Image (spheres, rainbow, N blue to C red):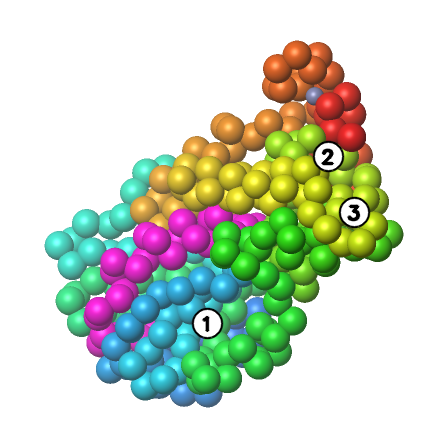
Amino acid sequence: MPELPEVETVRRGLAPILVGHRFAAVEQRRKDLRFPLPAHFAKRLEGRGIEALDRRAKYLLARLDDGEVLVMHLGMSGRFKVDHANGAESAPGSFAQKAAEAPKHEHIVFHLDDGSAVRYTDARRFGYMDLIPADSLDTHPLFIGLGVEPLSKDFTPAWLAGKLKGKKTSIKAALFDQRLIAGLGNIYVCEALFRAGLSPFRSAGTIPTKTGKATAKTIALVAGIKAVLEQAIEAGGSSLRDHARTDGTLGRFQHLFKVYGRTGKPCSRKGCGGTVARAVQNGRSSFYCPTCQR
Ligand code: ZN
């Protein structure tokens, strides 16, 4: 499933194609993806200009010139391919041509006013799209409960310390809670905890002081989360199996994993000498080094 860095990578790939252009025509080949598409979906998009392409958690938000926002979620296997106006395709190569890319999985095609087209394919159809007025976005059920954006300036050690104060759940479970931090998935939680030298099993309330003030651990954790996300975005997302960049190339971040999927490998922290372990925690794999993550 694409996580925050992959969605941000897709956003950066699509923004130059969409922003400043108009939807000349929209082909809608199904009534639904994971959920029904909104009424008159194609008609409401046709002729609309795209003013900005933003991201909130794992949602892409195309802001339209009529005050509506086209909200897009990639689900498990959703991806975009671009046919450029000059005839070039930006999802070349073997990865993009697998069975999942068969025409029957191409559900929506956005034709732009410059002759280019953005094709949405989704073999498993867990993705979804909606049209929501911009002024009600923050109070919409999809967005109202979402936590802080981990890459925003609002996500600070002081803020996190206040939120973790007195929490009895594991730090792994707390970081995974979308109402606390939006869009942080398993890979990035594992990698951030490794960077911060914190055990995924540690009680969340032990990261700040008892009164909810930031400690060296809180500072290391916030820095670890931001660093791992930024590194992943820079590398183009981790692109595990089902996911590709909008230009079809695989992300390089998966080669930079320090613990995720590395069970039994030596810990990469200098002087540690430990071995990466895996444990199931809240139904998901935790990868960590029992020697240096405390
Ligand atoms: Zn270690």
How far across and how far down the image is residue 289, in percent?
Answer: 73, 25
Amino acid type of disc 3?
A: Thr
As rendered, which of 157 and 282 lies closer to the eye? 157
Binning the other alpha carbons within 10 Å of mark 3 as few (below 14), some (14 to 19) or many (20 upward) gives some
Query: Which residue is drawn at the image coordinates 58% and 72% (left, top)?
Result: 143
As rendered, which of 177 and 34 lies closer to the eye? 177
Binning the other alpha carbons within 10 Å of mark 2 as few (below 14), some (14 to 19) or many (20 upward) gives many
What whole-number distance in Å separates the C-alpha atoms at marks 2 and 1? 36 Å
Amino acid type of disc 2?
A: Leu
The label on residue 209 is: 3
Image: 221 above or below 128: above
Read off the residue under disc 2: 198
Read off the residue under disc 1: 71
Image side of residue 67 versus residue 231, left or right: left
The magenta stretch spans residue 256: no
First along the sequence among labels 2 and 1? 1
First along the sequence among labels 1 and 3? 1
